[in-house]
Amino acid sequence: MRAPSTIRRPPADPSVETEGLATRLDRPMGALGLVFVLIVLGQALAREPWLVTTLSVLGWLCWAVFVGEFVFRAVRAPSQRRFWLRNWWQLLFLALPFLRFARALTLLRTARIGGVLSAAVRGSRSAGRLLTGRIGWLTAVTGVVVLASSQLLYVVGAYDTYGPALHDAALATVIGQPLDTEHGLARFLEVALAVYSVAVFATLAGALGAYFLENRRGAEADGAASRPEVLS
């Protein structure tokens, strides 16, 4: 009798395994990105030494996770050229927080601004990973934009307290209302937020129009299906 032949399975494609693991990491990394936005906000507002230290440690731990994820994706990417062409800009946001070690006041302020911008980018990407619906994604990104812009206004000294900065940034982001300050950066940010508010209303109008159009088509299809066929 002949021994049954063993079936040899082809080796697993490492690129497929890497892509699957990266996909599974999307949701937890997305949640961590949104948490990081709040940590950076807390760092700007904290005054107690123990709270400042705690938030700083948490911020650096989150950043270490982000760097580890980026390195993992870079090392295991099927095409290095394609990966770096699509993700080279992320190195800038990964490197900006390290400017905090600089002692010069100008560089320190730049580092704080860079940390806020990095958190905003990370939070926006996290919203895209976690939310698939257009309205939910737009709401999350708008929240990130409000928090980031209010932090920038507070960090650069355009507002003395954070409350008015948050209030004015929210109104500028949602309805395009001018900011109540004469600061130079605030003027630039005011225009950017006004443009964003127009994009928000355009997206909402498009989403609502698509929703009602889809409902109308569905109602027409149901009505056509319920009509009795006319026999010739």
Image: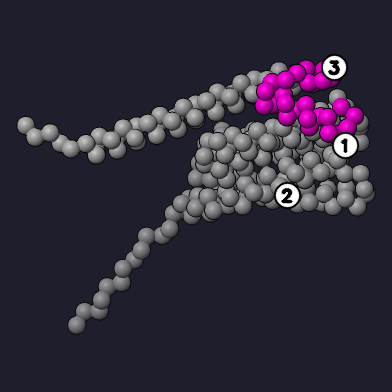
Q: Amino acid at mark 2?
A: Cys
Q: Between disc 2 and disc 1, whose residue precedes?
A: 2
Dominant secondary structure, magenta? helix
Q: Of helix, strand and loop, which one carries label 3?
A: loop
x then y, percent, for residue 125: 61, 39
Q: Of helix, strand and loop, which one carries label 1?
A: loop
Q: Between disc 3 and disc 1, whose residue precedes?
A: 1
Q: How many numbered marks, from 0 up?
A: 3
Circle 2 packing at 10 Å, graded few (<14), some (14-19), many (20+), is: some
Q: Is residue 161 magenta?
A: yes
x then y, percent, for residue 127: 61, 41
Asked if residue 222 shows in the view, the reply is yes
For this orientation, the residue located farthest to the left is 232
Name the residue that disc number 2 marks.
62
Q: Amino acid at mark 1?
A: Ala
**Label 3 to label 2, Cα distance in Å?**
35 Å
Q: Are marks 3 and 2 in contact (CB under 8 Å)?
A: no
Q: Which residues are magenta?
A: 159-188
Name the residue that disc number 3 marks.
182
- In front: mark 3 or mark 1? 3
Q: Which sits in the foreground, 128 or 161? A: 161
For this orientation, the residue located farthest to the bottom is 1
Circle 3 packing at 10 Å, graded few (<14), some (14-19), many (20+), is: few
Q: Are marks 2 and 1 in contact (CB under 8 Å)?
A: no
Q: Of helix, strand and loop, which one carries label 2?
A: helix
Q: Is residue 184 magenta?
A: yes
Q: Name the residue located 15 percent from the left edge and 36 percent from the top edge.
A: 229
Q: Name the residue located 64 percent from the left edge and 23 percent from the top edge.
A: 197
